[in-house]
Image (spheres, helix red, strand yellow):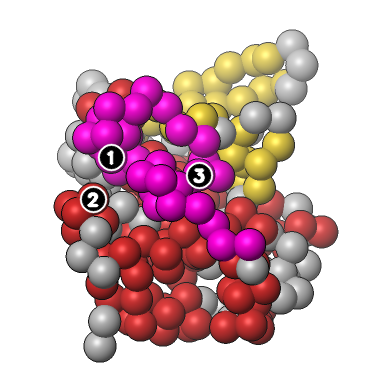
């Protein structure tokens, strides 16, 4: 089986139904804070891979709408959308067109791999983080005011090549699970703390003590930071 065919199977298995109507819901009705955190790791890794790709073709920046195929000169076919809906009818009622667009670019890239296109062969896994994101139910993304937004926060819509200088993010299942767990531990710690329980909790990454810092903001009231005592370890803000 070719790379493209396997990719079609993956896209076909995405649970599109779980996304339909999500734009009507609040972020916290869709996913937990921990899941959003894991989503943000996947998106950051996608941006990093695009950054590495941009460096390889000597481009400074690109838009999140652009596919790698387009960056090396291919155009989306005029009937590309119809074609996609015909092949994956379950996507038809979905309003999240960012997700469809990225799936289309991914499929095109996989067909270029099969065709032996040099850049596609060199960067076969560039879309992997986003496809994993969609497979895990984290595709609730849209663009708004120049940003890619979702329950994970916001990413700039422009992807710069210097993203490629960052160290790779671990997007393996185990690492993503740990990311979710870390947030759950911090959330549980904070809610205990708010109830007056002062029992300390340990950082899942390094075992050092987690501490809670309280802040007061003029506009949004009190917020908290749950932070590991080790430097450059776990640190996350909560409202
Ligand atoms: Zn730590």
**Mark 2: few/some/many CA within 10 Å (<14, 14-19, 20+):** some
Residue 64 painted magenta: yes
Q: Secondary structure at mark 1?
A: helix
Magenta residues (range): 49-78
Quarter of the view holding residue 223: top right
Give the camera-side residue of 105 and 236. 105
Instruction: Report crowding for label 1: few under 14, some 14 to 19, many 20 or more residues within 10 A (C-alpha).
Output: many
Q: Which of the pair 99/63 is nearer the observer?
A: 63
Q: Residue 203: where, in percent of width, then height?
A: 28, 41
Q: Estimate the spatial distance between the alpha carbons at disc 2 and disc 3, rounded to whole Å.
A: 16 Å
Question: Which element carries disc 3, helix, strand or loop?
Answer: loop
- Answer whether labels 2 and 3 touch (C-beta < 8 Å): no
Residue under the point 59% across and 39% down: 148
Residue 16 locus on image (x, y percent): 61, 75
Circle on res. 119: 2
Q: Nearer the viewer, residue 80 or 163?
A: 80
Asked whether residue 235 is drawn in magenta, I would say: no
Label 2 or label 1, whichever comes before in sequence order:
1
Q: Is residue 193 above or below residue 122?
A: above
Asked if marks 2 and 1 touch (Cβ < 8 Å), the reply is: yes
Residue 87's x, y, as percent? 57, 83
For the point 22% across and 41% down, the residue is 168
Dot label at residue 198: none
Q: Is residue 155 above or below residue 14?
A: above
Q: Which residue is labeled 1 in the image?
A: 53
The residue positioned 65% from the left and 29% from the top of the image is 146
**The N terminus: image quadrant:** bottom left
Distance from label 2 to label 1 (Cα)? 9 Å
* Location of mark 3 (residue): 66
- Whether the residue carrying mark 1 lies under 8 Å from ligand 1 is answered with no
In the displayed structure, would residue 132 be above or below residue 221?
Answer: below
* First in sequence: mark 2 vs mark 3: 3
């Amino acid at each position: 089986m070719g790379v493209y065919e396997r990719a079609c199977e993956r896209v076909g298995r995405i649970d599109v139904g779980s996304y339909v109507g999500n734009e009507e819901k609040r972020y916290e009705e869709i996913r937990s804070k921990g899941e959003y955190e894991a989503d943000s790791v996947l998106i950051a890794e996608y941006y990093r891979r695009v950054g590495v790709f941009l460096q390889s073709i000597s481009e400074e920046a690109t838009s999140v709408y652009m596919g790698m195929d387009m960056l090396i000169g291919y155009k989306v076919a005029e009937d590309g959308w119809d074609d996609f809906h015909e092949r994956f009818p379950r996507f038809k009622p979905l309003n999240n067109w960012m997700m469809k667009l990225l799936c289309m670019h991914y499929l095109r890239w996989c067909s270029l791999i099969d065709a032996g296109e040099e850049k596609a062969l060199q960067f076969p896994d560039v879309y992997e983080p986003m496809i994993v994101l969609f497979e895990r139910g984290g595709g609730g993304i849209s663009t708004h005011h120049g940003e890619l937004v979702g329950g994970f926060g916001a990413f700039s819509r422009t992807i710069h090549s210097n993203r490629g200088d960052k160290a790779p993010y671990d997007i393996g299942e185990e690492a993503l699970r740990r990311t979710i767990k870390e947030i759950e531990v911090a959330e549980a710690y904070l809610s205990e703390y708010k109830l007056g329980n002062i029992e300390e909790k340990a950082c899942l990454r390094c075992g050092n003590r987690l501490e809670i810092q309280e802040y007061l903001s003029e506009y949004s009231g009190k917020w908290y930071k749950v932070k590991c005592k080790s430097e450059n370890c776990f640190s996350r803000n909560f409202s």
